[in-house]
Image (cartoon, rainbow, N blue to C red):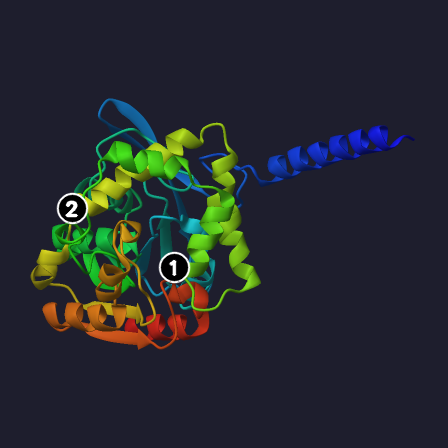
Amino acid sequence: MTKTSFLLTLSLLFISFATFAQKQDTLSITLENVKYAYPVKYFNLNTEGQDLRMAYMDVAPTAFNNGRSVILFHGKNFGGYYWTDVIKALTAKGFRVIVPDQIGFGKSSKAFIHYSFHQMAKWNKQLLDTLGIQKASVLGHSMGGMLATRFALMYPNQTEKLLLENPIGLEDYKSFVPYVSTEQQYQTELKSTAESVKKYYQSSYFTVWKPEYDELVRIAGGVTHSADYPRWAKVAAMTFSMIYEQPVFYEFPNIKVPTVLFIGKSDRTIVGKGLLSPDQQAIHGQYQFLGKQTAAKIYGAKLIEFDDIGHIPHVENPTEFIIALLGSLQ
């Protein structure tokens, strides 16, 4: 074999391998090829003239049924798939656990609509009504914390407890983060790659990276290979605008339900962080202070803090988080 033919063969093998690898890594934008830990059902909705599907898991207790329910609201960059350890712990204690993928996320429809925390809260209330659940404790992580707060404000009689795990929205981002239009944010989202997702997760979510976190990256990064990724990116931009434009920051004193905040003190999350200078970044997103400030605004709120833990306590230290969560539900 000549040197030229050898190099040609090697190049073809590399291309074939790269193509195979991409196919292996490519995920659909409704995560059909991502297996959740429990069966996924769908709740049908209609809004703005569109028929939508809201994916959810409804997991029965594995221990004696205590007659209580918990609904879990995921963060912006996640879906129901990252709640598995929490679901197992809750069902083992007799809780029924409802785990929706919000519209625009996970296995649910990626709709071009006006995204609203009020509308999302209403949809989740309708889901609980359909399932015959009159009252539930509401656990929200990150963006899900903003949604859980809105749910508790709108439906206090249906909220047994409000449980906020490193929620975003503890500051009013539009008061210090420069405005970008949804279209501008869309152009930014289009540039995401699996590599940039991993870099962001490593720098923003965890204090120490562990190999098991690669599965989160595989899912979030896998959709960037999809031919439908522009739709995912557009929805991501729309929900970015929702977070920026619809703060719950000023309404924490209005919460009337028992509330617990679970705060990883090493979290430095700021929505729109990349738009800030290093000096501005240094004075915002300080969860070791934001947790205390927020708890002081909510009558009777309890604050549970985790040292050396970042944005996702239930993933970074599931044992400590679950002990705290179960204690708070007693």
Residue 93 x/y as whole percent: 41, 68
Asked if residue 204 shows in the view, the reply is yes
In the rendered image of this protein, does residue 79 appear above or below residue 8? below
Residue 41 lies in quadrant: top left
Residue 292 lies in quadrant: bottom left
Distance from the alpha carbon under mark 1 to that under mark 2:
23 Å
Residue 152 x/y as whole percent: 17, 55
Kindly give the residue lying farthest to the front in the view shown.
Answer: 3
Q: Is residue 150 left or right of residue 250?
A: right
The earlier-in-sequence mark between 1 and 2 is 1
Other-residue count near label 1 (Cα within 10 Å), few / some / many at <14 / 14–19 / ≥20: some
Q: Name the residue: 22% across, 36% down.
A: 181
Count all numbered tags in the image, as a single digit. 2
Q: Is residue 157 left or right of residue 310?
A: left
Q: Amino acid at mark 1?
A: Ser
Helix, strand or loop for disc 1: helix
Residue 233 x/y as whole percent: 37, 35
In the rendered image of this protein, does residue 270 appear above or below residue 79? below
Residue pointed to by mark 1: 204
Q: Quadrant of the C terminus?
A: bottom left
Asked if residue 123 shows in the view, the reply is no
Which numbered circle lies on residue 19? none
Q: Is residue 29 left or right of residue 72?
A: right
Residue pointed to by mark 2: 246
